[in-house]
């Protein structure tokens, strides 16, 4: 259900249920968590890419599985929900940048999965949205991620109308980073990933950690955290080599 490979500094995680539009069930969530852990422990990996097999990125939760558990109690439902929630938390704490490569539809929890990545690259024909409200459901966990990506009013609109937006609209709202022509997507995203993978691994990790830890900090605390990260960065081998190269050129 989940494929993993690593080459040229890029760990690739592929959601592999194209017949189900890569919907997430309990097994695929477990395998996704394992693949993320594997990429975090692989020293050869500088950046992680998540994509979907077939025509779509991910259609969200497998509703057939939810229907089978309709008679479960609240604690059972909380346990299954927490499995995906834990994946989102682990993605936020992952030591490598995670990039979503979105073709086709990224809907509901699938849109949440893309948004949980650090960066989103999409085809012009891609579509994004949270249509859960149309079936009386709530995009509850992904709300915490969406709220950090777009304005409050835009988040409210997306969550309460179930609007499906184009890649261009998602880019304008700040939901995604880049939009590439469908015919150029593999080449353009390959170049993007290669460029990111060429950056200092220690600098990427420190930047990742600092940025997300600032969420709940006061301004003064964030500046102080920056002082510590600055000092740590200066002590890394990458920074020392980079400074030496810069001095030699100047």
Image: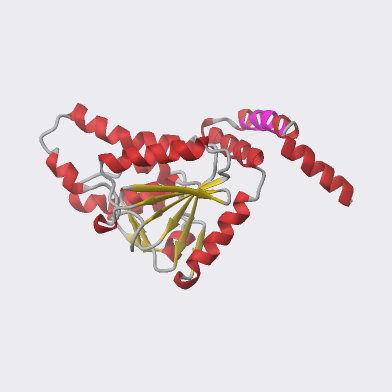
Extreme-bottom residue of the structure: 183
Is 83 drawn above or below residue 145 in the view shown? above
Residue 22: horizontal and vertical position, in percent?
30, 53
Dominant secondary structure, magenta: helix
Taking 142 as reference, is 78 left or right?
Answer: left
Q: Residue at x 54, y 60 (%)?
A: 190
Q: Residue at x 35, y 47 (%)?
A: 2
State which quadrant residue 242 falls in. Answer: top right
Taking 176 as reference, is 67 left or right?
Answer: left
Q: Nearer the viewer, residue 111 or 103?
A: 103
Extreme-left residue of the structure: 71
Decide if residue 152 is in sight here.
Answer: no
Taking 77 as reference, is 189 left or right?
Answer: right
State which quadrant residue 223 falls in. Answer: top right
Which stretch is magenta?
A: 222-230
Q: Is residue 104 magenta?
A: no
């Amino acid at each position: 259900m989940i494929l993993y490979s690593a080459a040229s500094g890029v760990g690739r995680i592929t959601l592999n249920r194209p017949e189900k539009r890569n919907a997430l069930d309990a097994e695929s969530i477990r395998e996704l968590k394992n693949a993320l852990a594997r990429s975090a422990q692989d020293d050869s990996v500088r950046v992680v890419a998540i994509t979907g097999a077939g025509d779509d990125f991910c259609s969200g939760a497998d509703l057939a599985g939810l229907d089978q558990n309709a008679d479960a109690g609240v604690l059972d439902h909380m346990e299954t929900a927490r499995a995906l929630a834990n994946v989102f938390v682990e993605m936020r704490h992952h030591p490598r940048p995670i990039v979503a490569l979105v073709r086709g539809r990224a809907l509901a929890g699938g849109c949440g999965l893309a948004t949980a990545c650090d960066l989103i690259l999409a085809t012009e024909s891609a579509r994004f949205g949270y249509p859960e409200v149309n079936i009386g459901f709530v995009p509850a966990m992904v709300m915490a991620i969406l709220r950090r990506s777009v304005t409050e009013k835009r988040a409210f609109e997306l969550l309460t109308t179930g609007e499906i937006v184009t890649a261009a609209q998602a880019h304008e709202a700040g939901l995604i980073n880049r939009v590439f022509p469908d015919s150029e997507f593999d080449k353009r995203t390959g170049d993007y990933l290669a460029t990111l993978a060429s950056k200092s691994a220690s600098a990427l990790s420190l930047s990742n950690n600092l940025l997300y830890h600032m969420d709940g900090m006061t301004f003064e605390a964030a500046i102080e955290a920056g002082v510590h990260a600055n000092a740590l960065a200066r002590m890394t081998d990458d920074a020392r080599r980079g400074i030496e190269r810069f001095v030699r050129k100047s």
